[in-house]
Image (cartoon, rainbow, N blue to C red):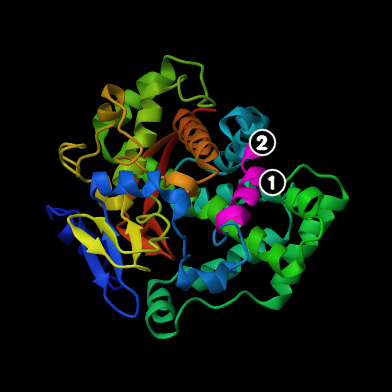
Amino acid sequence: MGLCPLRFLDSQGKRADGYVQLRSAPRAKFLVWQADALKWLFKTDSSLDHPGSRSLSSVLGVNSLLWADGERHERFRRVLAPPVSARQLPRWHSMVAATVDRAIDRLKPGMVFSPTAMARQVALEIAGAIVLGSRADVLDEFATWLDRTIGSVPRTLAYRLFLGGFPRSPESLDRRLVAAVRQAAAEGRPSLASLLADGEFAGIEDGELRDHVASLLFAGHETSASAVAWTLHWIVENDDVLANVLAELRGSTANGSTASGLPYLQACVQESLRITPPVPNAANRQVGTDTPLLGTTIPARAVLAPSIYLAHRQRDVFPNPGAFDPGRFLERKPQSHQYLPFGSGTRHCIGSQLAQLEMRLFVASLLRRRTLRKVRPGRARLRGHTLTPSSAFRMRVVACHD
């Protein structure tokens, strides 16, 4: 699956059993997308183990929230989730909107630009403000290192297939990340990092702190940037959809700060997350005992990987799944085991509401202020574990409306 993951996934989508065994030894692993199996998986999530991604463990470290399990995982979520919950979104509105608008200001008539690169830069600034409490210089160094590590498909394949995973970040970068966190905490800046360096976790060691910050920055901007870029791709690709979005924007003063303010745009966001989920597979689960599931027996210690990509292409839930159709989200709301762009169960992404806020504000502001035309499409590719448009994706600014 590593060489052509999407081709492999598409080839499996019509299997009636809803799963495929990826390996048998040294530990069995199954890719799962059958609805009832996913429902069981997320319902019993608290009793399962959650082995993290081996290839990303060296990049992000094994001490962060992404690799924590059981009571330790619950403690970190209890501290980190509230500041980015739906209830707390208003505190981030102005910062997100201002960051987006500064980026749009730089787009001039006739300019050809990469929506993916633009979205990645905006998402990094937003993640930096939330995680570190400011636009720290270390963010650029972090982004440069990350791009060198996962930004090239051949390099990614070499790391994953032949070198056992991605390389660790340089010690100099690790020290700067930790220093930025300690400084934010010392200055009393509201940030997720300060929550880790103070209070309940005041004694946290530098190595663990580095892993948390690297994971939060990575998860907080790579997936959001991909989601924004895909949403722009799908809207501009489909003339009728673009016309509907522009009509909604003309008929409303809403800026996307709430989903209800721009319901058609929100449906576009949801449909983009369905057809091109930023992360094709949810977090691994591991069963502790032989488990009857999927019409077979899953052996003890086997790993189950929920396939978001394939769950979102089940024809009984999403008719004509290869078509971009925002209307399907205006008509009905799928269940959490059928539609899971941010995962589900105990590993549901803590920043899911913030990511959708960012998507709405970005797309609404950009399409209000600029007329765009797609110059070159971008094929889907994996950047690390993130599904993103390829670097060929380009748009042209036809007109400005400031």
Give coordinates of residue 399: x percent, y percent. 44, 34
Residue 357 seen in render: yes
User: Whole-percent x and y of residue 289?
Assistant: 36, 64
Residue in the picture at 59% in, 63% down: 143
Residue at position x 23%, y 62% in the image: 297
Q: Within 10 Å of the Cα at label 2, are there few (<14), some (14-19), or many (20+) other Cα atoms?
A: some
Magenta region, residue range: 69-83
Asked whether residue 79 is drawn in magenta, I would say yes
Circle 2 sits in a helix, a strand or a loop, which is it?
helix
* Quadrant of res 181: bottom right
Query: Residue 54 location in percent, x, y?
Result: 46, 72
**Is residue 339 rendered to the left or right of residue 179?**
left
Q: 290 or 337: which is nearer to us?
A: 290
Circle 1: is it few (<14), some (14-19), or many (20+) Cα within 10 Å?
many
Circle 1: element type = helix
Secondary structure predominantly adopted by residues drawn in magenta: helix
Looking at this view, is 115 or 254 the one in front?
254
Which residue is the site of mark 1? 129
What is the distance, in whole Å, between disc 2 and disc 1 at their CAs?
A: 8 Å
Q: Amino acid at mark 1?
A: Ala
Classify residue 85 by image quadrant: top right
Q: Is residue 376 visible?
A: no
The residue under label 2 is 95
Q: Amino acid at mark 2?
A: Met
